[in-house]
Image (spheres, rainbow, N blue to C red):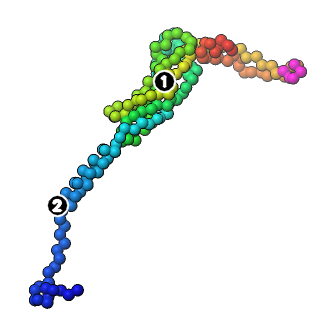
Amino acid sequence: MKNINADIGLPKIKKKHRFDIGARIVCLLIALVIWVYMVNIHDTETVETLTLKIDVLGENALSANGDMMVYGMDKKTVAVTVKGTNRDLKKYADTEYRATIDVSKISTTGPHTVDIVVKTPENTTITFVSADPASVALIADYRVTRDIMIETEIIGADNKLIYTAECSHDVVTVSGPQGLIDRI
């Protein structure tokens, strides 16, 4: 292409590369505002289900109350449903939620049903919706310790004494719930 300015005797004009910094900053700010708006508009309430291990609280108070103990929990885990924003649900791991039962109020032996309490992380939009199961069945009994004599004889199929075994100890000490120890 021919330089028109050179044909009529004018000096050649150089193109200036201008970096219009003001316009670039305005575009960046507009893009940032649109991004923040889109992130917040799409952060909707979501429901999530977690599986948590059930922690037992109050066993020390229970053992101080006549040396009682609990055993035979029918469930060890609980399916917990929580609701919150996508951002909050992704921010917290399953280990930051807690499912507990409190056995400190149990004062009698036998079967009991204890409600599960779920704690969500604090200072969030996350709320507890439901737990499945909502309660746990367990048995409370007194803790006892007994010495049990060991007798060893090996008898064959024809009910004849085949051989005997010698034990270095003739007593075993067993500790546990009274209802089960009494059956031994």
x, y (%) of residue 139?
Answer: 56, 16
Of 108 and 81, the residue lying toward us = 81
The magenta segment is 155-159
Residue at the spot of label 1: 134
Relative to 21, is 101 on the left or the right?
right
Question: Of helix, strand and loop, which mostly describes the magenta segment?
Answer: loop
Disc 2: CA contacts within 10 A as few (<14), some (14-19) or many (>=20): few
Task: Check the picture and name the quadrant holding the N terminus.
Answer: bottom left
Does 109 appear above or below 71? above
Residue at image position (14%, 90%) is: 7
Relative to 31, is 42 on the left or the right?
right
Q: Secondary structure at mark 2?
A: helix
In terms of image quadrants, where is residue 127? top left
Task: Check the picture and name the quadrant holding the C terminus.
Answer: top right
Given contact means CB atoms under 8 Å apart, are the residues at marks 2 and 1 in contact? Answer: no
Q: CA distance from mark 2 to mark 1?
A: 61 Å
Residue at the spot of label 2: 22
Of 87 and 109, the residue lying toward us = 87
Disc 1: CA contacts within 10 A as few (<14), some (14-19) or many (>=20): some
x, y (%) of residue 98?
Answer: 44, 29
Sequence-wise, the earlier of marks 2 and 1 is: 2
Q: Secondary structure at mark 1?
A: loop
Amino acid type, residue under disc 2 in the picture = Gly
Residue at image position (26%, 55%) is: 31
Q: Within the magenta stretch, is there residue 2?
A: no
Does 58 appear above or below 92? above
